[in-house]
Image (tube, grey):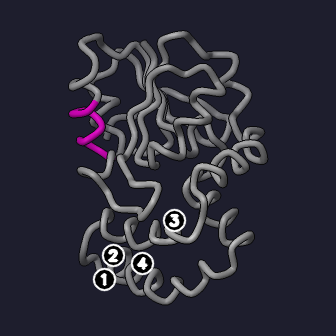
Amino acid sequence: MNVYDFDNTIYNGDSTFDFYIFCLKKHKNIAKLFPSLAKEFAKFYILKKGSKTRFKENMYRFLQYIDTEKEVELFWKKHIHNIKEWYYINQKNDDVIISASPKFLLEPICKKLGIKHLIASNVSPVDGKYAGINCHGKEKVRRFKNEFSESIDEFYSDSYSDTPLAEISKQAFMVKGDKICKWKFK
């Protein structure tokens, strides 16, 4: 079983950010939420206060102004080309995608790609509220072990924040753009 992070790993970019910009361009009224988003950004990323979940919930408030299901479908029609070619070559039937991105955003693309196993953040597509913890770091391991008894043959990610998953994998690989190399444990 091979396990992949999604953003900047098999997808060229950050799908959540790209989806936000995609919706912002189409729905200008989302811009009125920008001051509170900037405040939460500064609080979490600059002052190191609060939580990533709170920051993301603040960002996801824009969902209340759109038809999320429709916009996600349109987004993937326009952004499917961002799936990296090397993934199509390596893809197997039992691949698992595990991501901090919202499940509602990744489910349609996983279905289109034939990926049957997705573990992602449970975010309401209506109001952006989390049901549970952001699927990040050690939380990814907890969720993986909750769903699977198998071990991970190969793990791919672009970030050392995924070291907990790399540590439980037979082989782990760091992805930078289209370059893939063995994981270097620190």
Q: Mark 1 points at which residue?
A: 47
> What amino acid is found at the position of numbered circle 4 in the picture?
Phe
Q: Does the magenta stretch include residue 140?
A: yes
Which badge, 1 or 3, is on the more N-terminal residue?
A: 1
Which badge, 4 or 3, is on the more N-terminal residue?
A: 4
Q: Mark 4 points at which residue?
A: 41
Q: Up-down: is 117 above or below 46?
A: above
Disc 2 vs disc 1: Cβ atoms closer than 8 Å? yes
> What amino acid is found at the position of numbered circle 2 in the picture?
Phe
Mark 2 lies on a secondary structure that is helix
Q: Up-down: is 43 above or below 75?
A: below
> What amino acid is found at the position of numbered circle 3 in the picture?
Leu
- Residue drawn at (69%, 25%) of the image: 86
Mark 4 lies on a secondary structure that is helix
> What amino acid is found at the position of numbered circle 1 in the picture?
Leu
Q: Could you tell me residue 56's position as x and y percent?
A: 40, 65
Instruction: Name the mark nearer the viewer: 3 or 2.
Output: 3
Which badge, 4 or 1, is on the more N-terminal residue?
A: 4
Q: Give the range drawn in magenta.
A: 136-143
Q: Mark 3 points at which residue?
A: 63
Mark 1 lies on a secondary structure that is loop
